[in-house]
Image (spheres, coloured by chain):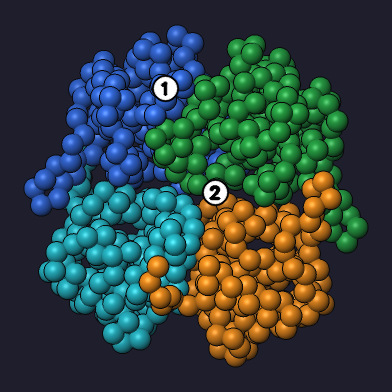
Chain colours: A orange, B green, C blue, D cyan
Amino acid sequence: MPARTHRIVIGVMGPAACDPQTAQMARAIGRGIAERGGVLLCGGRGGVMEAAAAGAREIAGLTIGILPGTSARESPPNPFIDIALFTGLGEARNWLNVCASDAVIAIGGGFGTLSEIALALKAQKPVVLVGSWHFEIEGVVPNAPRASSAAEAVGLAFAAVGEAAKR
Amino acid sequence: MPARTHRIVIGVMGPAACDPQTAQMARAIGRGIAERGGVLLCGGRGGVMEAAAAGAREIAGLTIGILPGTSARESPPNPFIDIALFTGLGEARNWLNVCASDAVIAIGGGFGTLSEIALALKAQKPVVLVGSWHFEIEGVVPNAPRASSAAEAVGLAFAAVGEAAKR
Amino acid sequence: MPARTHRIVIGVMGPAACDPQTAQMARAIGRGIAERGGVLLCGGRGGVMEAAAAGAREIAGLTIGILPGTSARESPPNPFIDIALFTGLGEARNWLNVCASDAVIAIGGGFGTLSEIALALKAQKPVVLVGSWHFEIEGVVPNAPRASSAAEAVGLAFAAVGEAAKR
Amino acid sequence: MPARTHRIVIGVMGPAACDPQTAQMARAIGRGIAERGGVLLCGGRGGVMEAAAAGAREIAGLTIGILPGTSARESPPNPFIDIALFTGLGEARNWLNVCASDAVIAIGGGFGTLSEIALALKAQKPVVLVGSWHFEIEGVVPNAPRASSAAEAVGLAFAAVGEAAKR
């Protein structure tokens, strides 16, 4: 494989509605991604997605929203999205959110977020959990580190992307 | 909404490789779905998917496989599939498996199966778990009943479809 | 590749609204597909899709509808659909219609139909045109035979599936 | 609808292999899009897609590639792509290319390009044709202006986006 020439994209996944504490965490994570030169990708709507995009934009980071509808009329992006990619795929866009990211940080709950965690693990993308779902099967817990601060979450995500690049 | 004129479709989700005991369970569930007049939908490959389709075919039930590739060359269906629907969507077909089913029975592990459980809950489709993933968030376990026998799993799935029809 | 064990699926593509003459043609084509033992696949809505499904059902042929919404509430199938596969993919389901068919018969106009013709040719699926789009580039017309009767259209589609099977 | 806060995205569609003259045209169009502040979106591969991205990058324009695979290993982006959005959707990504663009410029031939033209017209996105497909039905030619120079193509695309914004 030739040397990588495209930018690092970190996806931040979480529900469209969240409490202020979760929003603050998402904002700090979004900012942290931008500080390290990453592109912030999210679902483009409110809640965790808006807070993360707002955080990245605090320091002029680039933000991408993967929207469910075919146009801004159908699914308006939050005001912190630079590039609104309309998909017309509805909830099937969850797969895209994962595929289009080098690593995924999941914040908080929601079934969409759980699906994105599972799809990321399926696609062998690194996943970092921040106060999100717990899941196990027959006593085995899959490999997805948990972070308790924004700095830790961002650090783990970028480290995992670095590791993946060496493979 | 007009009266329903199309058939009931029950999706059976599970990994492409499984132990004999899981396969036996999947086979009994597939047969049970066909006995109640349901169409068996699965991912069309081996393991749980093949066993479930084989079970339905024991009594001439109709079986549908939602395949990842664009043709039988790319992703050959198992020999118990009547209708092989090639999608060319790869793992994004997980969303289809869920949307195309009236209810979903998840058997065993795998990240694909976990994503299908989450996507079904997101799409408000009934989900029945058979020895599959445990998941919770902040101590809350989502509403997805666990069955310990094939008969119980099939009974729960059809009952849930009946309930959903009344809503 | 092992011997084929799944059924032949012929897709009939066309607009959701059409004149009586086009509907009659679609109906005769649907019936012809069922007479030859094929499964009729369509977009599951009205117009050409409903007429083709009605034709197949005249002689108890099996009919599949690939619907845009996630449920019958969002996109009710026409009453001649046996298996309603909800996709939640909106117009992106056009790709599925094509991938899931062994051959495609396009009847009449509409941009959706033109996209299905193009996607079928891209996916190297046989395409038969019945009074549909004309298209060429630099004077070259792609290989998609035109039929002037239902019998001719069905004959060409099954012949092409037979040819493809030998490759 | 609130005031638009996200950037204008122009999609350039065309085959993965092309002659030098077509590549030169694509390059001039990509540059023209960037000169007017637009984001260049393409399929991320070679031929027309690479030439258009290279043109945008000549003046530091932002370029997005919508790739068919799930990772750079599966589908390496061309070296002029800033943001490589892997989709894992194969050719179904054509729908995305169209939905994610405010307007589409189609250069040259290929069935994928024809499908993108048709999907764009279906999604009511403006389409500009540069030496690409001719298509009509019953003597009616759909509304998609033809441009004979890069400047004309870019001008028509941005004018159409402006018109669409007023609707």
Pointer 2 local density, CA inside 10 Å: few below 14, some 14–19, many at least 20: many
> Which secondary structure lies at badge 1?
loop
Tell which tag, 1 or 2, sits nearer the viewer.
Answer: 1
Q: CA distance from mark 1 to mark 2?
A: 25 Å
Placement of D62 over or under C7, stated as above or below: below
* Residue D157 vertical position relative to residue B114 in the rendered view, above or below: below
Q: Tell which of C15 and D130 is nearer to you.
A: D130
Residue A57 visible: no
Residue at the image position 19 percent from the left and 44 percent from the top = C135
Nearer to me, C10 or D155: C10
Which label was assigned to residue B92? 2
Task: List x then y, in percent, for residue B153.
Answer: 80, 28
Q: Position of residue D23 (x, y in %)?
A: 19, 69
**Tag 2's secondary structure?**
helix
Q: Which residue is outermost to the right?
A: B139
Q: Residue at x 41, y 71 (%)?
A: D64
Task: Tell how many labels.
Answer: 2
Residue B2, quarter of picture: top right
